[in-house]
Amino acid sequence: MSLLAVGSVAFDDLETPFGRQENILGGSASYFSLSASRFHPVQVVAVVGEDFGPEHERVFEGRPIDLKGLVRKPGKSFHWKGSYGYDLGEATTLDTQLNVFQDFRPTLPESYRVAPYLFLGNIDPALQLDVVNQMIQRPRWIALDTMDYWIRGSRAALERVLREVDILLVNEGEARALAGEHNLLKIYRKIQALGPKILVIKRGEYGAMLLSPEGVFASPAFPLEDVFDPTGAGDTFAGGFLGYLAAKQSTDVNTLKHATLTGIIMASFTVEKFGTQCLEMVTEPDIKGRMKAFSDMIRVNGL
Amino acid sequence: MSLLAVGSVAFDDLETPFGRQENILGGSASYFSLSASRFHPVQVVAVVGEDFGPEHERVFEGRPIDLKGLVRKPGKSFHWKGSYGYDLGEATTLDTQLNVFQDFRPTLPESYRVAPYLFLGNIDPALQLDVVNQMIQRPRWIALDTMDYWIRGSRAALERVLREVDILLVNEGEARALAGEHNLLKIYRKIQALGPKILVIKRGEYGAMLLSPEGVFASPAFPLEDVFDPTGAGDTFAGGFLGYLAAKQSTDVNTLKHATLTGIIMASFTVEKFGTQCLEMVTEPDIKGRMKAFSDMIRVNGL
């Protein structure tokens, strides 16, 4: 009954106005699985190089994260170098080395092919479709993340895989690029026509917006005094959102609202330290405590 | 028991990607009073020229809007010309003609000087302070709007009037310029030190954020399919927000949350047509209906 996640496990060099870190564990599958596994068991499909050692594997140990699908290849892992300005908005990519990721072609272990929930992290849409085609039975839902690079460069392949997708998670710029529209309600109609019935817009410091056939919802971000590093916030959000949905076995609108808040709370931890550091350390009482504070904040009595 | 509002009554030339209009009624006091008067009686202090005719006065008739403080002077009214790009974000000012506004020095009619609620619209901070000093008794609360022009150019005068202010309403850029900080929680602490105990951040299509000693709240905007003209949205928000607070005679945190939602709903009408057109026509059932839809949208059961 796992949530299957396909994505990248990488090493990042990060520069923010508050400091720099080199060779820290990152990648969409890392953030996603550390976040989602707080709520539901996760199976990971990704590729790493010889630089992925026992100290990195240990990060995922003792959690309901199945690494049977983590393939080890000769060479180095995917490496990304990025920097952020003072507003901690969009990252500037300084260097990308695909390394073992170059020829990555995800092959699902037998036990993964019946997963009822599937998250296709931000990789080549042709590979995302290939994963869908390896499933023995159609998952209850399939969620997908993508980015400008694929929207502009691999439109046809992306549209093919989107036909299979139930939940699309993107940021505002990506949603606009995909739909060729500025207005979010118009964007939602165009994206529904492409396949996904549920659209989640990740808005960074403005939180997230949810568009579903049962209605629209938007939540602010959890206000933080100190944001250090936004890397992985989107994947952490997706992990919290989809992990919560998988645990609840429902996609009714109120469950989707709670899932949105859960994703926001998980992402609020990620951005407080470099890399996956905070996500590794945070305890269940931390998560529950922050969710309680957030609930008190956004609750309006007598609504 | 009125809400006293000081600001501008102007004529605007507006260009948006959806059309253009010339010489339409605008100004902060117009939008504010048309919005606030849906909830509480308003007294207006502003200046107009000879071009302000009976057809313009009629817009305010039949509403609890007292125009005793609307001064008529020889010459033309304040005239603003602005344009918006496709994203309908910040306006580009194409032309500003102060006209009668140049020498405006608000003088409060006797009956205005005991108003329990005071809104100081975005005018010269020296004039805002002058209005405060004309009050016979200290209002229960004083709210203030300002802009970059005064924050950068009249800092000392602005700081003087802010010492008298309870509620500051600004957009994000203005809050950052005033506090010299990027993070909103840090901004709030600096602004509290300047005087205002309640800070309302107007965020346009992202809604609004409220920071009060009792906690932080943020609401998304009401999602609209068609936004025509954002002119006056901020003043309309302030009118709904402060009109609601005045009507409820409270500033406890749950009242402040409802006031925020009220401001957002009122602003959502303003942006649907040019100028004050929608604000003039909208009925009480329209307002209640949209508030109901918004409540259903943002309510999370089991929070």
Image (tube, coloured by chain):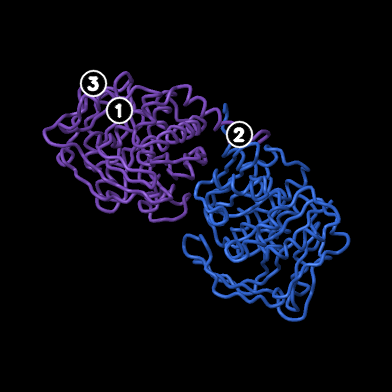
Chain colours: A purple, B blue
Q: Residues within 10 Å of mark 3 (few under 14, many from 20)?
A: few
Q: Which residue is mark 3?
A: A111
Cα separation between marks 3 and 2: 42 Å
Q: Find residue A135 and report its horizontal and vertical position in percent.
A: 24, 28
Q: CA distance from mark 1 to mark 3?
A: 10 Å
Give the amino acid type for the residue marked by disc 3 in the picture.
Ser
Kindly check if marks 1 and 3 are in contact, taking CB atoms under 8 A apart as contact. Answer: no
Above or below residue B150? Residue B207 is above
Q: Tell me which numbered mark, 2 or 1, is placed earlier along the sequence.
A: 1
Among the 4 quarters of the image, the one containing residue B162: bottom right
* Quarter of the image where one finds residue A166: top left
Mark 2, residue position: A299
Kind of residue sitting beneath label 2: Arg
Query: In the rendered image, which residue does mark 1 sit on?
Result: A4
Which sits earlier in the primary sequence, circle 1 or circle 3?
Answer: 1
Q: Residue furthest front?
A: B156
Using the numbered discs, state the Cα–Cα distance from disc 2 to disc 1 in whole angstroms.
Answer: 33 Å
Which class describes the residues within 10 Å of circle 1: few (<14), some (14-19), or many (20+)?
many
